[in-house]
Amino acid sequence: QVQVVESGGGLVQAGGSLRLSCVASGFTFSGDAMAWYRQAPGKQRELVADIGSSGNTNYADSMKGRVTISRDNAKNTVYLQMNSLRPEDTAVYYCNVLWGGLLYWGQGTQVTVSS
């Protein structure tokens, strides 16, 4: 059974940093494509960043220069380092993994940025 579990969210002041982690399990991990999305109250879920099997990365324009996505294939884990956080970054952050032609999502981790 494929599982995706996010962690690392919390409450941070504007200008602060957080590092989110996402662990995928239940399948033979081989550097599959993974991504971070976020969803703020009343808004649609949107892409934050993704990383392909070859390590190529893609970032949302709103997050460029403030976030870095990385992966540790030995640990089946992808990270999202977020810096210079703003109140508008407040959202539930979700991770997904593309495996076997299917997209698996985690339950999300709350990030709250106070002004």
Image (cartoon, rainbow, N blue to C red):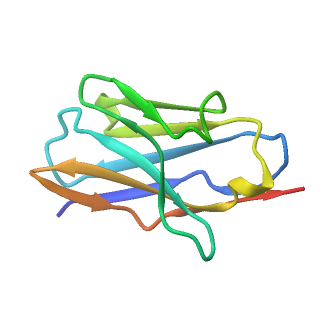
Q: Quadrant of residue 2?
A: bottom left
Which residue is rendered at x = 38% and y = 62% of the image? 106
Q: Quadrant of the C terminus?
A: bottom right
Residue 81 location, x and y as percent? 60, 35
112 relative to 67, above or below: below
Q: Is residue 49 left or right of residue 17?
A: left
Residue 62 or residue 113, whichever sits in front: 62
Which residue is rendered at x = 75% and y = 44% of the image? 85
Which residue is rendered at x = 69% and y = 53% of the image? 89
Residue 102 location, x and y as percent? 15, 57
Residue 112 location, x and y as percent? 73, 60
Q: Quadrant of the N terminus?
A: bottom left
Q: Quadrant of residue 103?
A: bottom left
Residue 94 location, x and y as percent? 46, 58
Q: Is residue 14 left or right of residue 57?
A: right
Residue 25 or residue 50, whichever sits in front: 50
Q: Is residue 101 left or right of residue 56?
A: left
Residue ranking furthest to the left: 100
Residue ranking furthest to the bottom: 42
Residue 12 or residue 49, whichever sits in front: 49
